[in-house]
Amino acid sequence: QVQLDESGGGLVQAGGSLRLSCAASGRTFGSYAMGWFRQAPGKEREFVAAISWSGGSTYYADSVKGRFAISRDNAKSTVYLQMNSLKPEDTAAYYCTARRTRLATMKWDLYDYWGQGTQVTVSS
């Protein structure tokens, strides 16, 4: 079993930056692909970014490409989401996910573990 603990959310003005962190329990973090999804009130869950087990492959939603960056530190069992040039439409609860395989995916139903989420609110 893997537990995921997100942090770093908050309120920021448009154009600002935040860095989300996701600390994972368990000794197998280094062999798991990781992802970030988000969900705004009244909207469906949306893929944001994903990273392979080694960090060698990353994937982004078109809406965040060039503004967000996903990374991981396997020694610390932590994955990060650096969010720059934030927009009001980025406002959502952000969820960290883990997949029991080395390959990342953009499909939410292929992830095995989910965190509780951290709220990001971007004011205009």
Image (cartoon, grey):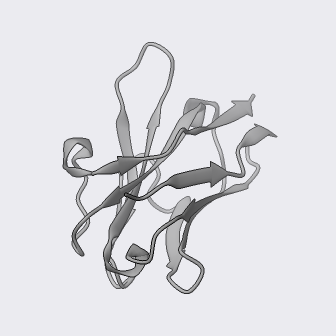
Q: Report x, y in % for residue 86.
A: 65, 46
> Is 99 positioned to the left or the right of 5 in the image?
left
Q: Report x, y in % for residue 3.
A: 48, 54
- Callout count: 0
| On-image quarter of the N terminus | bottom left
Does 104 appear above or below 61?
A: below
Task: Identify the residue shown where x is 76% and y is 49%.
Answer: 16
Name the image quarter holding residue 120.
Answer: top right
> Is 123 positioned to the left or the right of 46 in the image?
right
Among all residues in the image, which is located at the extreme top?
A: 42
| On-image quarter of the C terminus | top right
Does 74 appear above or below 96?
A: below
Task: Identify the residue shown where x is 49% and y is 45%.
Answer: 115
Q: Report x, y in % for residue 65.
A: 44, 58
Does 94 appear above or below 23?
A: above
Does 70 appear above or below 94?
A: below
Name the image quarter holding residue 119.
Answer: top right
Task: Identify the residue shown where x is 25% and y is 65%.
Answer: 100
Nearer the observer, 88 or 118: 118
Query: Quick check: can you spot residue 118?
Result: yes
Task: Identify the residue shown where x is 44% and y is 77%.
Answer: 27
Nearer the observer, 59 or 7: 7
Query: Quick check: can you spot residue 13?
Result: no
